[in-house]
Amino acid sequence: MIGRLAGIASRSLFVFDPETAHNLSITALKTGISPVCPPKPDPRLAQTVAGIRFANPVGLAAGYDKNAEVPDAMLKIGFGFTEVGTLTPKPQAGNDKPRLFRLVEDRAVINRFGFNNEGHEAAFRRLTARRSAAGIVGVNIGANKDSADRIADYVLGIHRFYSVATYFTVNISSPNTPGLRDLQARESLAALLSAVLAARDEEAGRAGKLVPIFLKIAPDLTEEGLDDVAAEALAHDLDGLIVSNTTLSREGLKDQVTAKQAGGMSGAPLFAKSTAVLARMRKRVGSALPIIGVGGVGSAEDALEKIRAGADLVQVYSCMVYEGPALPGDINRGLSKLLDRAGAASIRDLRDTRVDHWAAQAL
């Protein structure tokens, strides 16, 4: 009943423009009242990835809690982990409004926010205040649009949030900051990874703990681009990859009017493309490197298919716009049933079982 009411409340936000609805949902969560009941823990869904013990494989992707305002509220509704940001050193307003668009018929979203956030210091204060709280909170770091040295901005993020981050995500794949995706080119990527990992190692020496670093990539990379990312990730002993961010593609959309809006598209139509890229990357990097699968996950079946394509964990965001805040709990409960059906002792047992199928799909 609570989940059904939460879904109705979520759909009622559709009377507002998308960004207003997003802000209202953050405000509601800040009350501390959980809109849904989380699922009972299922030990078969727990696993250790990049040295971190995850109670379940379903996380909230960056972009929702941009300013680290509600990480604990999101953990309470059933997420196994949450990711705040993208955070840039200096506050920035982002791109002009309107910059968020629903494609209801496609169950998709287009955004061109442009890393709008309150900057490092505001988020650091909030994360410091909840430092003693339980739960996995990743910090997604980026560069200011007007930065003269974007790599230096990422290094600043490592230093600033090292004491409060369970893991870091280096986001170089947003299409909404001009030139940002150029950091995925091999020479630039090598310089970036060298710099952020050196900063991490410096902080680890002081703190006595090693915080993992994940790299978030775009779904629009060419085969050669995927080769370069895989090679550099392995060469630098990166802790993991997140596949993938939003896409510039508009292929197959029903709403061809809203599809003309500039920005990155996410939601259900991204599932096939992002899963094919995920599988291709799994084949390139081998079985040991952790991968978080993102893009169009709106059900337990979607989540399991990502895992079968090579993901250790999954993240959701845009599909929650349509499914409501009960989605993480629904996915976890559904995964337990799917494990029952498969006779699997652990979610880990099903990873990679459809890598070849998805790697063969056209991009």
Image (spheres, grey):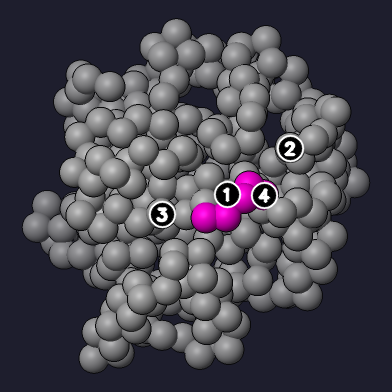
Residue drawn at x 64%, y 25% is: 179
Residue identifier under label 1: 113
For marks 2 and 3 on the same chain, the one whose residue lies earlier in the sequence: 3
Q: To which quarter of the image does residue 317 belong? A: bottom left
Above-or-below relation of 328 to 179: below
Residue type beneath disc 2: Lys
For marks 4 and 3 on the same chain, the one whose residue lies earlier in the sequence: 4
Give the SS element for disc 3.
strand
Tags 4 and 2 touching, CB below 8 Å: no
- Measured in 3D between alpha carbons, the distance from the residue under mark 4 to the one under mark 1, in whole angstroms, is 6 Å
Residue type beneath disc 1: Phe
| Residue range (magenta) | 94-98
- Measured in 3D between alpha carbons, the distance from the residue under mark 1 to the one under mark 3, in whole angstroms, is 11 Å
Q: Position of residue 8 (x, y in %)?
A: 28, 83
For marks 4 and 2 on the same chain, the one whose residue lies earlier in the sequence: 4
Q: To which quarter of the image does residue 284 belong? A: top left
Residue identifier under label 3: 101
Residue drawn at x 82%, y 68% is: 125
Q: To which quarter of the image does residue 363 belong? A: top left
Q: Position of residue 137 (x, y in %)?
A: 61, 60
Residue identifier under label 4: 94
Give the SS element for disc 2.
loop
For marks 1 and 2 on the same chain, the one whose residue lies earlier in the sequence: 1
Tags 4 and 1 touching, CB below 8 Å: yes
Q: For mark 1, does the 10 Å Cα neighbourhood hold few (<14), some (14 to 19), or many (20 or more) residues?
A: many
**Main SS, magenta residues:** loop
